[in-house]
Amino acid sequence: MEITTKATSVRQGQNKTPPEKPFGRTFVTPLYMGAILNPINSSMIAPALVAIAAAMHTSVGGTAILISSLYLTSAIAQPAAGRLAEEFGPRRVFFVGIFLVLLGGTLGAVARDMSSLVTARVLIGAGTSAGYPSAMLLIRRRAQATGLHSPPGSVLGGLAIAGAATVAIGPAIGGLLVGWLGWQTAFWINIPVAGAAFAMAFTWIPKDPDRVRGRSLRTLISRIDLLGIVGFGGALTALLVFLSSLPGPDWAALCISAAIAAALVGWELRAANPFLNVRLLASNLALTRTYLRNGLTLLGTYVILYGLTQWLEAARGLSPYQAGLVLIPMGALSAVSARVVSRRTDVRAPLIVSALLLLVGAAATLFLDSSTPVVAVIAVTAVFGITSGAGNVANQTVLYREAPPESVGTASGLLRTFGYIGSIASAAITGTAFRTHVDDTGLQHISWALVGIAALVLVMTVFDRHLANTDRQSSP
């Protein structure tokens, strides 16, 4: 009954007469603009870290908190933003996110100390987290309103393509802008991009149905499961502290994470509107496997992105800007492969190809050393780019098909959360491998870890029979 009521209100909140092009440029462009805000801030900060360290009179290592604070905030805020979008409307949450990005960008650009910069990154992380889950929910509701079982593949693929393209050019453009205009560029770049996204969304995205008026504060807290969000954030924060502590494990943080997670599961099993639907994850194993598969694939990709970048600079003597240029083909091919896969209706074949290429790329890194030509290094990174683009789009499509329509916002946010966990876990792997010195031996250790990760992803994908059933159900 509740799902029916929600679907009815969604239809009432949309145009009664479906537009001739429901997924035309005026609808998808602001969604893509919102979705690129997070990768912009993930990629453009890297070239600015050395300059920030000098300006703030701290070590380069001390600026790592600017990266981890954004990832941690985003990992918690992505599913939370999705839940808020389901309750209050994706357009409203999208606008709140844009406001937070503008606030964080402005604060960072005028900051004079590290605490202000960290605050700015937290605001930016929270704000950019609204873009992707809001976009997924808006796409789902537009498809329902126009009588479509699912949107064109190019619409979902466009979200991945926009992010991949941004990551591809982000380090290089960031390096140029930081060199010309200073480290503040990494923050004030948010102002024009977020402003354009706001203007487009205000003009082109239909208003949300009014779901807020007439509800008490207690009812709203129950509907969004505030305690569930807080518990999820606490468990994830403690887990990421443990991962960040490696190779010297902080066992207390792991125990705290496990204790909070156990309490969270107990709470969510009794909650009327659970934020983390434990029963759904236990019963819908296809969705759960999608989270794990996506997280492990991105873990392998991020290990290369971070580990190889450090190796190129320390062992090969490249500048940060030169290392960023080496990685451009990786990001570009990620966007191209995402485009190709988005035009397909099947998901099993792209996921198997993605897993195979991940294993091939991992094996190829075993043969890299300080004497390897840069062209060969670029070729290896290109394999990971294809893997990332194909896997991202295919996993996103599986999630869209498997997640309950009324909770696609939260489900989409959780998909991103697993990706952020993978990124921080990759930092733990590279930190362990390069704990004393960045050299060829450490790269070998990273390569063997990659081989293990890739083999696990391949086994999970090949033996997942549900993927074939999904393809049959979606075929015309």
Image (tube, rainbow, N blue to C red):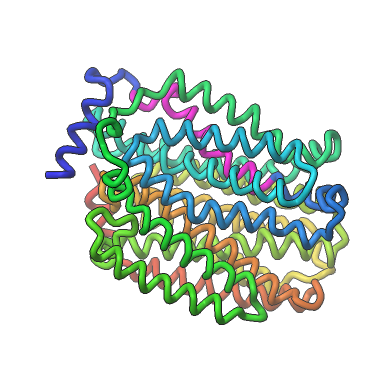
Q: Is 411 inside the magenta-drawn segment?
A: no
Task: Left or right? Give the position of 30 relative to 379.
Answer: left
Residue 282, horizontal then vertical, whole percent: 27, 67
Q: Residue at x 78, y 62 (%)?
A: 61
Task: Left or right? Give the position of 221 relative to 329.
Answer: left
Who is closer to the viewer here, 242 or 25?
242
Query: The C terminus lies in which quarter of the figure?
Result: top left
- Highlighted magenta segment, given as a residue range: 22-43
Q: Is 28 inside the magenta-drawn segment?
A: yes
Residue 9, horizontal then vertical, whole percent: 21, 31
Who is closer to the viewer here, 89 or 283?
89
Q: Is residue 394 visible?
A: no
The chief SS type of the magenta part is helix
When the figure is inspected, residue 247 is found, relative to residue 88, above or below; the finding is: below
Residue 228, horizontal then vertical, whole percent: 36, 59
Q: Is residue 67 visible?
A: yes
Who is closer to the viewer here, 312 or 343?
312
Residue 17, horizontal then vertical, whole percent: 23, 18
Instruction: Quadrant for residue 62, please give it.
Output: bottom right
Q: Residue at x 69, y 38 (%)?
A: 107
Instruction: Quadrant for residue 306, please give it.
Output: bottom right
Q: Residue at x 30, y 33 (%)?
A: 212
Task: Left or right? Give the position of 306 relative to 261.
Answer: right
